[in-house]
Image (tube, rainbow, N blue to C red):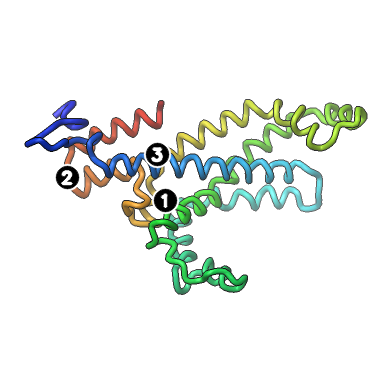
Amino acid sequence: FGVANYFARQDGVSIGVLSDPLWWQAVGNTLWFTFTSVALELLLGMLLALLMNEKFRGQGLVRTAILIPWAIPTIVSAKTWGWMFHDQYGVVNDLLGKIGLPSHLAWIAEPSLSMWAVVIADVWKTTPFMALMLLAALQLIPADLYEAAKVDGASPWQRFKRITLPLIMPALVVALIFRVMDSMRIFDLIYVLTSNSEATMSISGYAREQIVSYQDMGMGSAASVLVFMMVAG
């Protein structure tokens, strides 16, 4: 009970959440997933936001269509990507085969690929959130600043670095905080897509496994407290 659920010794063997190698693997999986997915979402979201901020025909339609992945429930998108990643009949392997790349990859079953499958599905679903947050910030930048910079001979990169990036930084930080917290607590996408395998288990998945699968309320509660501390901290 209590501290013993985190770290204790029984018959000379270390027990408890912090002594469980699977917990630390889940921590590593969660941190890797968070860093990789958020970095990709930031990059792609920035590119999409800059594109949607330009004037072009069908701009309103594009802004509406980009919301579709974000609006689809996670369970639905996870099952859809699971079918797309099927090693024999999935569209992903079919497309890879058409361009001459290995086309019989076991995206879900292969430990070295399964986490990348989760990242791809998450980036597809969540990039629109990042893009819309940044687009809202871009819309608030006065056009006069860009016109003055053009008159002064500033290049597009200089305008982005000196005007755009500093002015959208507050919104960028908020979006990053939201996404990091959301990624740290990921459970449903991994559980549906990979059945919470050890190669993709997150800290939330570990807590769920202790409570539901093993009926170990002590370990599960201790893991849940650690999840809360990592997400909120």
**Placement of 92 over or under 12, stated as above or below:** below
Nearest the camera: 24 or 122?
Answer: 24
Q: Amino acid at mark 3?
A: Arg
Q: Looking at the image, which residue is at 44% across and 62% down?
A: 107
| Spatial separation of the CA atoms under disc 1 and disc 2 | 23 Å
> What x and y, as percent, mark residue 21?
26, 42
Q: Is residue 105 left or right of residue 163?
A: left
Q: Amino acid at mark 2?
A: Gln
| Callout 1 crowding tier (Cα within 10 Å): few <14, some 14–19, many ≥20 | many
Residue 32 marker: none
Q: Which residue is mark 3?
A: 185
Q: Looking at the image, which residue is at 57% across and 33% down?
A: 175
Report the number of discs: 3
Q: Residue furthest front?
A: 12
| Callout 2 crowding tier (Cα within 10 Å): few <14, some 14–19, many ≥20 | few
> What x and y, as percent, mark residue 75?
42, 54
Q: Which residue is mark 1?
A: 189
**Placement of 97 over or under 70, stated as above or below:** below
Q: Amino acid at mark 1?
A: Leu
Q: Looking at the image, which residue is at 36% across and 44% down?
A: 202
Q: Is residue 180 left or right of residue 68?
A: left
**Quadrant of the rendering where the C terminus is positioned:** top left
Q: Which residue is mark 2?
A: 215
**Quadrant of the rendering where the N terminus is positioned:** top left
| Callout 3 crowding tier (Cα within 10 Å): few <14, some 14–19, many ≥20 | some
